[in-house]
Image (cartoon, coloured by chain):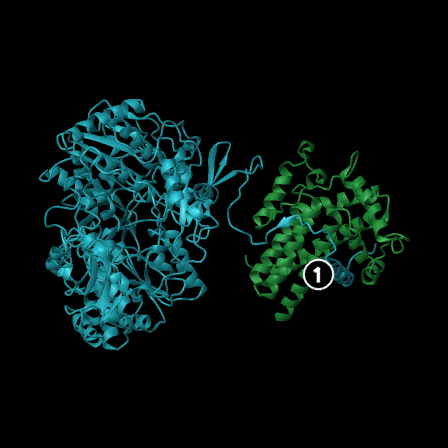
Amino acid sequence: MKSLNRRNFMSLSAASGAVLAAGAVDSRPALAGSVTFAKGGKDFSPITGKERTAIPTACWQCVTRDAMIGFVEDGRLVKLEGHPDSIRTNGVICAKGQAGVNQVYFPDRILYPLRRVGKRGEHKWKRVSWDEALDEIAGRLKPLLDAGTPEKFMYQYGRNKASQAKVSYDFLHAFGTKTIGNHTSICEGGKWTSQELMWGGHYDNWDFDKTDFVLIFGSNLLNTHTNHIPVSQKLIEAHVGRKVPVYAFDVRLTNTAAHADEWIPINVGKDGLVALAMVNVIMNEGLYRKDLFKFMKVTADRKASVDDKIAAVKERVAKFTPEFAEKESMVPADKIRDLARGFAKAKSGVVVSYRGTIAHQNGADQERAMMLLAAVTGNVNSPGGRCQGVGAGWKAPSSKVGQKTGGKLRGLDVNDGFPGQVAYPTHHVSNQVLKMIKDGSNGRPDVYMWSCYNPVYVNGEVNENREIMKDESLMPFLVSVNIVYDESSSLADIILPDVTYLERWDWEDMVSPVQVAEHYFRQPLIKPLGESRDIADMWVGLAKRLGIELAWKDKKDFVRQSCEMTPGVKEAGGFEYMKKHGIWHDKNARPDYLAFETKIPASALQADGVIFDEASGVYWNWHKSKAKNEAEAKSVGYQNTPSSYKGYVGQEVDGEVYRGFKPDKVNKSGFLEFYSELMKAKGMPVFPTYTPIPEHAVMAKDELHLTTYKVAVHTHSRTSHCKWLSEIYHDNPGWMNPKTAAERGLKDGDEIRVHNKLGEITTNVHVTEGIIPGVIAISYHVGREHSGRYGSGNRSPIPGVADDPDFKNKWWDKHGVHPNTIIASSPDQISGQQRWMDSVVRVEKA
Amino acid sequence: MANARKDMAETASSRSHVYGLLAAIFRAEPSAAFLAQMKSSEFSNVLKSLDISLGDDFQDTPCDQLAEGLAVEFTRLFIGPGPHISPHESMNIEFENPMEATLWGPQTVKVKKFIEAAGLEYGDSFDGMPDHVSAELEFMQRLATKEAEAWEEPNEEFATNILKIEERFLDEHLSRWISRFCDKVIATSEGPFYREFAEVTKGFLEYEGESLQAFNASAGNGKGDSG
């Protein structure tokens, strides 16, 4: 044979092509599918080359809860990857997600039930059996049922969502208690309450795929958002792929601000004011879009014409001139004008806001200003705009409520703050729970149990929290359901070993960035280590002891039943389908943009119980409210009848009835409400406004703002024992502007004292232009008293898994400081949101 | 630039045809219809131009009869029973430790992993092992087809990435054993058909190795390097 050259190669190819094209070759190709270089789904042992078992499941490191694939080799979890079929994540997970492996195998993990034998905080423990532990807890709960005081059993949770939350509520309601606390106020409760006052349900999503302009206030969403991987990818695709302009307002040069077109430094607590000044420009220059005004409530008169509404908004924001905003916020007036014009003229745009905006006194009102900016430019629930989040809806089995209390639920009033403290605590005021227990005016729980939560560490005023929980006269019996020996479980009377999320069953439902719901699933990747047990199975053990009948046998059964009863998932193949695929979405579903414009059919208005409320223009079904009869419903009216929002049918606008913005949690109308009768009723600003933060108004010259932030590789309190993450981030010096540092004679790296009336912390200073003057910023995550050797350097005084061979490689001996020690547990008066960003401190060289 | 892309697309498409033909030849016994196509004047002329002869009686023997004879030869060469040439990478590649030369061993897994990482899977009707010569040749055919599409789209970055993957697969797999396999076929064949196509396979893959290296070197010199 001659050797091949280009010429005879091309001839050979042409002839080969002709033979192939004739279709005469073997019709059974070896390979199926198409070349896609698909992400994920397979993995192989680098040592043996053997293919690993791949199991679909879901993350739980943070609330984003991405769908994942876990890889198991010889019964050991070795690796986690994103689920390639996820429309939420496109097969990506973050560093925290990948380090989930560490949650299972960290050396200080709690694997057995433990009973305290010394004083609280003395760290003396005895291993007990599950039966002993549950018998003791049931022995404390039974008398509460016998006395008709189930409310004295309080359960409080941190990261609980979807089936994990549902299953606990189900048992607790069957037991008869509604003293159920959460942690939402230290997270994003203020944003949710604010949105409930305006557009109904909570959670906003930003339609980055279609947007043309992005304004970000107080949110480092490329690193740390509560829907991190889904939204950060979409933002990157828009900004890099389509060159969509992005402007980030922040006190600090975050990673998001660094990747934006421009970082716009802004003074602490001024985000809402700048948004109002932008609205001022847009209204005065006639750049607003009329479309949405029809559905907005901006005056007391619900029948106001669009022109009247435009005039009213103009008047409301007239005093917030760019020059006034510049004086307060340090954002140049011309910059405010430019961005207002750019945003209003763009085909579509999103306004992103987060904890930097809302974790303040009146933070919920700042969020209203953000929504106003979106609304006057027509960017609400529209393509490319700020949209109401869409998550999966699941059905689940439910047990009979109040089985020993005659069907009644009873609760201690310790979840919503002190009387008069918070106007609309629609997501509770978890930051005040320990203070209220200390105060005792509203009663105290005899049994306080918590899971996936660390009340001492995650709230402000850490020292006070510790003292309250140590005090047996205030909190007589404490049960911690946990995987790690931490600041709170170390004070418990009984510690129950929880499973990690990689060892349990769940269905999941987090918001999708593409406005199409994704149903997904969590299943155990491995057998639970030691004697760890899913909390749901712990409830089953208690139910048996208390004679309570549950509608499910165990967590797996709860999840199985949910899969078999949830539309869509059921038809796809239910539980077995989800076990195999881990994920399902309706391929025909499309985003439901502008759904508020949908007209309500006349038949819906004539249904039994539906009445019209002239004051608000709302059609509602009084049967679903707490009104005793129709006459009472009519005389008390929609706004003042408890739970009337549950019967909302539609909103009358210009003689037609529309779906409008359906209320949730509060009795607002179906308008997108900016003029809020509910706010007015509580003496809060009726229309979004600017209210200076009281503590900031009286700051002494040598005082600084203390702001906090999160980093990409940790959750607030649940990852410091993960070695891969703590290796990356374990110390948190305070960021300070060179000017501020110079005023205090500080150089980069100096040791500093940061203090106020609550206490003092010591750290080092990181001098950088990446933060505005007058501020010190200290991250969360670290400064752990406990949390095992990787998190705090301290071995836990409990029998754990065998020593980790990697421990010899731990090269860091710094474990940071905890800013919460000097932050007050203090709620926003509108929503109850913890005011993380309002603290004032002094800083000196140590 | 557009002309360069067109050339690349044409070349990739041509390469995929040759891979496709060779994959078909080694996958199974040729059917009569397949042999009829090979008797076409276009194909015969190409073979002639390459100094390849499938035997004096190839053109004159009826296709059914040819197919029958080649089925016996295919079975004897690649299936057995008795001594035969294993058409699998794991049995032909040179290992430092000869104990690693096991059927369906770690080397097979590496091939499977490579192919599946590209998003393909082994079809239900394919009953061979993942590192069968025809599967590897077909994989290169599929890559080259995708590459041609990428040049035409045009998605230059994707196309050059596929080129790199093709070169990697050749380096890590095909070219590490194909020559030795073809030599065995050449030495063992009783008739010209498999001997000559073993020659074509060997010659083509040598040509491929050089061409891909050249393409990737030029891509690395600023022509759409994706890093």
Q: Is residue A243 left or right of residue B184?
A: left
Tell me the quadrant of the picture where the N terminus of chain A can be found: bottom right
Give A742 or A377, whichever is nearer the viewer: A377
For the residue marked with disc 1, what is the amino acid? Ser
Question: Which image quadrant is residue B46 in?
Answer: bottom right
Q: Is residue B59 left or right of residue B25?
A: right
In the rendered image, what is the letter of the chain coloured cyan? A
Name the residue at 56% across, 35% down: A47
In the rendered image, what is the letter of the chain coloured green? B
- Residue B112 at x, y percent in the picture: 61, 43
Residue underneath mark 1: B14
Tag 1, which chain? B
Please, what secondary structure does the residue beneath circle 1 have? helix
Give B69 or B112, whichever is nearer the viewer: B69
Q: Is residue B219 left or right of residue A436?
A: right
Question: Which image quadrant is residue A232 in?
Answer: bottom left
- Residue A84 at x, y percent in the picture: 48, 49
Question: Which image quadrant is residue A122 in?
Answer: top left
